[in-house]
Amino acid sequence: MVDKVLKALGAAHEGAVGVLLADGSEPGPVYFDVGSGSHMPSSTAWHAYDGRYSRPQAVLLRGSCSCGWRGAAEYPLDWTTLPADQPLYEADVDLSGPIADYEAHLSVIRDGAVPLPAGLAGLLAELVSRLGGLAAEEPLVALKALADLRHVIAQTGQDAVYELTDRDVPLKVVATALGTSEAAARTYLNDYLHP
């Protein structure tokens, strides 16, 4: 459930395999010339940096996150063993290191989020299960329950935001507790104040 919450809070921690060039810089997006037109597609996917068609060539891979985090470990690409005439995504490149580093970063984010008390987590799990069953068996009852729940959520959320404001809780603390960025946390809080 925590991953769904992270996604709902602005996708502040979307992971990727990042690249570094030979000079140690992190390149910008690669643009693909598809002929005439006003739209020029681009990509920041690791395999776009294959050196073909005047594109930059990656020399190192590392874990990366949309929050700005970059993995400390670097994984070299051995271009002597990679085929120069085919796309990099077709090559047998081991991505397990950067992916594991990102997952470790996400684990730190999860661990920093405020844990729900066991009783509340159980209650939420039961509510999700019961609402799912109702949606399949009695959809009108499920929708009525969700309508009632929407009002409870709006009021309780507003009360919680006002309490945080009264206590002068810094936005950085709120973001950490929710497992998201400060920008996403600000939007989340404002959604309760200005529905």
Image (spheres, rainbow, N blue to C red):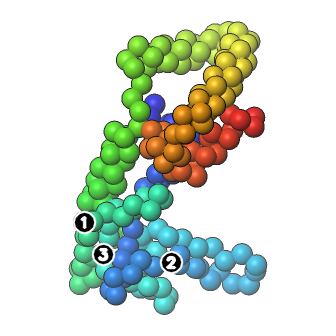
Position in image of residue 109 (x %, y %): 38, 45
Answer whether residue 88 is visible to the viewer in this image: no
Position in image of residue 20 (x %, y %): 36, 77
Distance from disc 2 to disc 3, alpha carbons, whole Å, reads 15 Å
The amino acid marked with disc number 2 is Gly
Q: Which residue is mark 2?
A: 28
Residue at x 53% of width, y 46% of height: 171
Q: Which residue is mark 1?
A: 73
- Residues 64 and 109: in front is 109
Q: Is residue 104 above or below residue 47?
A: above
Mark 1 or mark 2: which comes first in sequence?
2
Distance from disc 1 to disc 2, alpha carbons, whole Å, reads 20 Å
Q: Which residue is mark 3?
A: 60
Q: Are marks 1 and 2 in contact (CB under 8 Å)?
A: no
Distance from disc 3 to disc 1, alpha carbons, whole Å, reads 10 Å
Q: Is residue 146 above or below residue 163?
A: above
Q: Is residue 14 left or right of residue 186?
A: left
Q: Quadrant of the C terminus?
A: top right
